[in-house]
Amino acid sequence: MNIIQGGVTAPKGFEAAGVEAAIKYQNRKDMALIYSKEPCVCAGVFTGNIVKAAPVRWDQEVVAHSPYAQAVVVNSGIANAATGKQGYECCKQTAQAAADCLQIPQDAVLVASTGVIGMQLPLDRLTAGVQELVKNKKDTPEAGQMAAEAIMTTDTVSKQAAVTIEIGGRTVTLGAMCKGSGMIHPNMCTMLAFITTDIAISKELLQEALREDVADSFNMVSVDGDTSTNDTLVILANGLAGNEKITSKNEDYDTFQAALHYVTTTLAKKMAGDGEGATALFETKVIHARTKEEARILSKSVISSNLSKAAVFGHDANCGRFLCALGYSGVAFDPENMELYLENNEKSILVYQDGAVTDYSEEEAAEVLSAPEVRVLADMKMGDAEACAWGCDLTFDYVKINADYRS
């Protein structure tokens, strides 16, 4: 696998664009387009929230019932959630506008929205934006970057990833972009994420690969404990790499799945590190757990804890915060037979061992927690399973951002 520069335009046959449509913001890009020159098999996973935004319901229908997908239209600023029949009709009309401009079927167009809940989208601006997107679409890295920037809301940076792999003597490329900074506690994936690939693969295996992957990638992220109404992750595969079509779980499938996992975990970590107001990426790795599921539960409990997140922000090496979060996770373990470490990319400090806090240096531990990437490592000494979860510190700015989000 080779890590390359770029995003959704990296695979063959994909174009993108980002434009200013004045949906809610002024003087910033707020609409994006992803388009494939060839029809794509499509897979997706969506929010576990019972309150689902109109575009989520539209996309679920496209993924489940359309013979193929070929375009994605995304807006930022307004979520089109809690908007009733009018909101769903807006999805339909946006898809139709894109279908008309691109000369493809309406049910080959996916739509996505992110932003304020409860506001109706301005359909005239959406349709005008679609026309501009189609006029500006290109297959360049710059076009992919423009699209990634257009889907941001409170994000401080755009988020992209791309890799190439070899399958059957052919070069296969995966590219992706996502947005997510707040209202992040996924029960399937993240706020919005879009993956493109030129691999030839069956729809059934594409869906299975995606669903299996999110359990250890986007589902292991939490910024603030809130599962959005708009969570959407879709992948489009147009087959232009020319590999022999993958129709069974073989070595080619495993190679693709590994590349997919790299892309999704890269985006997940970027999202966690860009949590609203965050100053640090906060990772928890649990090793030697009894089962994979228990490792997931334990690691996510720590990064979801407000007290743990506040300790990271304050560079306070209070290991009791992390132990407490492990203890109420619901997973049974022996606190008299485990170890806890505080780590960054340069140093690791043992702070708790077999029932007691160690004689560690508070000054040294605070230095470890001052890094831009911080890790809690928990060795449960119960088995061979492990898992990682990602979050961020909890800062004053998180409250400021969300206290006046609508204004």
Image: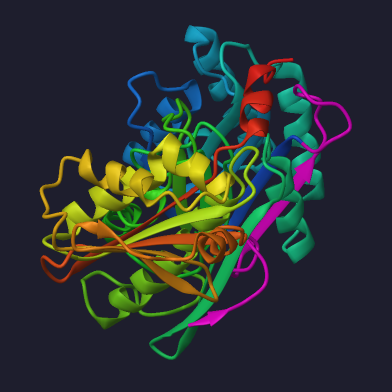
Position in image of residue 166 (x %, y %): 45, 85
Position in image of residue 29 (x %, y %): 80, 38
Does residue 28 appear left or right of residue 390 in this picture?
A: right
Question: On the image, which quarter does residue 186 sit in?
Answer: top left
The C terminus appears in which quarter of the rendering?
Answer: top right
- Residue at point 55% right, 38% down? 394
Is residue 28 found inside the magenta-colored segment of the image? Answer: yes
Above or below, 236 relative to 407: below
- The number of callouts visible is 0
For the rendered model, the colour scheme is rainbow
Is residue 189 found inside the magenta-colored segment of the image? Answer: no
- Residue at point 16% right, 40% down? 330
- Residue at point 67% right, 67% down? 6
Above or below, 87 relative to 350: above
Q: Nearer the viewer, residue 9 or 305?
A: 305
Could you tell me if residue 335 is visible in this image? Answer: yes
- Residue at point 21% right, 71% down? 248
Above or below, 104 relative to 253: above
Position in image of residue 317 (x %, y %): 47, 53
Q: Nearer the viewer, residue 364 or 157?
A: 364
- Does the magenta stretch mainly form a helix, a strand or a loop? loop
Question: On the image, which quarter does residue 325 sit in?
Answer: top left
Could you tell me if residue 195 is visible in this image? Answer: no
Q: Which residues are magenta?
A: 1-29
Position in image of residue 390 (x %, y %): 44, 53
Q: Nearer the viewer, residue 212 or 17?
A: 212
Above or below, 354 relative to 397: below
Q: Nearer the viewer, residue 387 or 337?
A: 337
